[in-house]
Image (spheres, coloured by chain):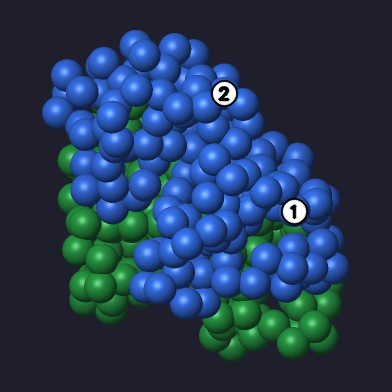
Chain colours: A blue, B green
Amino acid sequence: MIGRLNHVAIAVPDLDAAAAQYRDTLGAEVGPPQPEPDHGVTVVFITLPNTKIELLHPLGADSPINGFLEKNPSGGIHHICYEVDDILAARDALKASGARVLGSGEPKIGAHGKPVLFLHPKDFTGTLVELEQA
Amino acid sequence: MIGRLNHVAIAVPDLDAAAAQYRDTLGAEVGPPQPEPDHGVTVVFITLPNTKIELLHPLGADSPINGFLEKNPSGGIHHICYEVDDILAARDALKASGARVLGSGEPKIGAHGKPVLFLHPKDFTGTLVELEQA
């Protein structure tokens, strides 16, 4: 079912500092900050040869990562995203296996303009897993 | 400096259950458990088309992930590993930038038989970063 690792998302308290560290210290290809008001985050994409890192910073009082940064003030790995060919088929198979899909269970359009779903971390070894239809 | 994302490591409380979930529910290519006594872990490698997931489970009373699983009983993402061409040059550049290298600062031979180092999470947005000479 799952294909490529689309990205690893890291929540950070200081987006400029984290972007500068990946660009200047780690020598990676770092994009500009992209506000994603529909998702309550500002994102910086880091392009590695085989996948992406997404730096996430809260945008707005209702950002879904405010709570994460309260618990992890230095930041931390927030989620990993796997690609799937058919997100509805993946969802239905996962639900049939007993896994919980977060929210309404209907895919939303993610930061890359593609349908995404999140799975309950308690059902996946404590890991927040995003599925994205590639 | 950094190249490919070599792997994402996920610490899990039940290695068989996690391996079965990735194999049967998520349909991924899952290898057999590999004891790594020198590292205090048993590892299951999951091969994705573009990178790997490593499931880590403690091996022995002194396992370096015992503490992580005490704090995160359901498991969780433990570290990410970036490839570098020259681990000593990478280490020296990072130390010059003020980042702390864990342990003695000398590379050890990692689970893949290649030299690795770990960087202090407080210096990298709360993320434990492994560097592996590819």
Q: Residue B106, image x and y in percent?
A: 65, 81
The quarter of the picture where residue A55 lies is bottom right
A38 left or right, relative to A91? right
**What is the three-letter code of the residue carrying label 2?**
Lys
For the residue pair A89 and B18, the one nearer the viewer reads as A89
Q: Is residue B125 left or right of residue B76?
A: right
Residue A33, label in figure: 1
Image position, residue A58 (x, y; %): 54, 60
Question: Looking at the image, is mark 1 or mark 2 earlier in the sequence?
Answer: 1
Tag 1: residue type?
Pro
Q: Position of residue B127 (x, y in %)?
A: 53, 68
Q: Label 2: chain?
A: A
Q: How many marks?
A: 2
Mark 1 to mark 2: distance in Å?
19 Å
Q: Is residue B25 left or right of residue A7?
A: left
Q: Residue at x 25, y 73 (%)?
A: B71
Q: Which residue is mark 2?
A: A114
Q: Is residue A116 above or below residue A65?
A: above
Q: Chain of mark 1?
A: A
